[in-house]
Amino acid sequence: MWLTPDGRAGPAVNRLLDRLETAQFDALDPKTLKRLSTRDARRALDRARSGKAKDVARAEIELSTLFADYVRATRAGHRAPMLYESAALAPVIPSVTAAVSAAAKAPSLDDYVRQMGWMHPFYAPLRDAMDTRAFDPVQRRTIWENIERVRALPATPADRYVLVDAASARLWMYENGKVVDSMRVVVGKPESATPTMAGFIRYAIVNPYWNVPPDLVQHTIANNVLDRGLRYLKQNTYEVLSDFTDNPAALDPAKVNWRAVAQGAIAPPRVRQKPGGPNFMGKVKFEFPNAQGIYLHDTPERALLKLDDRQLSNGCVRLEDADRFGKWLLGKSLPKAAKTKPEQRIDLPTLVPVYITYLTAMPTERGIAFRSDVYGLDSSTPVEFAGG
């Protein structure tokens, strides 16, 4: 895999040795860095130049062992927190056999090592940026923290998956590791930040209700009722309901103590906005069930999508083109919603993973693009490396 039969090193060998000798940029601990020393591999390579089959085989084994140890160490490195619906969505540490086999199957071993194909495609460009002097200390710290966020993403999440970046407020659709489409999105405000999380998009809901989160009922709905009267609820097609069951009873809004709700003295009632018209969900939402109540959805507030800074929602992800996104997910156009039939569920033919991350430093064709840290998650502490 690494050497020619007469003991000459292939182009991937120097690439691997360079990766190993700069492994401090992978934030590996001193004990691991010591285990990844290239000293024995270089000695084995010198002996392999004799062309003797035994020496070539020993060098091959030494390089493959080092490579597998490096793959497993980088995959096991510290990563930023992410909420995973299932362990199947999280990065895994491969066995030695799996690590070597994946490299052996790569069309180009040199490209595989250069791109660090066992990591997410964003990883190697960020990691390599740390091995330059092109960035100031604050930028290097930002890159470093984003490396840890990228580590929370698997190398190849699935044949088809969705990536949402809350820092740039953008969504990408991937097929076979390549971006096939992208669009603007609106994500959470700093006070209601969209969490970093991963789930399986399972179905679309056409003509959805919007169930107003209890904190918004307290801080927004209740205060608007107090300021504008009960007509506010009617004008915005809000229903006041008894509970969150499938068949709640309707409550008389006039009998709700809205002042006590606004003050937090009593629990807010369930408030639901009817489909259509001003409904904040627009005409469709895409569900990946989670305890945080986050989903992707259409929006009637189109002007927000034209802004450069789009961290403006209550946490959910609002889509620039829900129809286009739905067609990609379903493989066909979304059906026209029957206005008299709310909550029409359409199951996806296959589950599609969605990853929501927060990248204030992202690789682009023009280099590393830095984003505003709107959520205040980046640190300004200088980066220190074990081993150099």
Image (cartoon, rainbow, N blue to C red):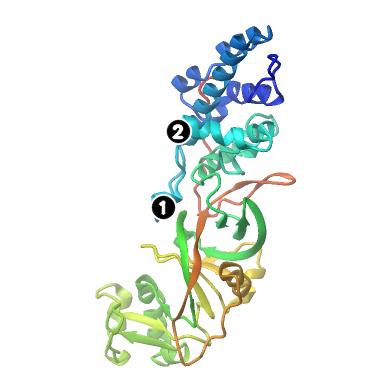
Q: Nearer the viewer, residue 259 or 32?
A: 32
Within 10 Å of the Cα at label 2, are there few (<14), some (14-19), or many (20+) other Cα atoms?
few
Q: Which residue sits furthest left?
A: 266
**Secondary structure beneath label 1:** strand
- Decide: is 375 above or below 246: above
**Quarter-of-image position of residue 12:** top right
Q: SS at mark 2?
A: loop
**Residue linked to disc 2:** 95
- The residue at the point 47 percent across, 85 percent down is 275
The amino acid type, in three-letter code, at marker 2 is Ser
Q: Is residue 382 visible?
A: no
The quarter of the image holding the N terminus is: top right
Disc 1 vs disc 2: which is toward the camera? 2
Query: Between marks 1 and 2, how big is the CA–CA gap?
Result: 24 Å
> Is 293 situated above or below 47?
below
**Most foreground residue, 373 or 64:** 64
Write down the quadrant of residue 132 in the picture. Answer: top right
**Where's residue 59, x and y in %?**
59, 15
Q: Which mark is residue 83?
A: 1
Instruction: Using residue 341 as the reference point, say whether residue 54 is left or right of it.
Output: right
User: What's under tag 1, amino acid-wise?
Assistant: Leu
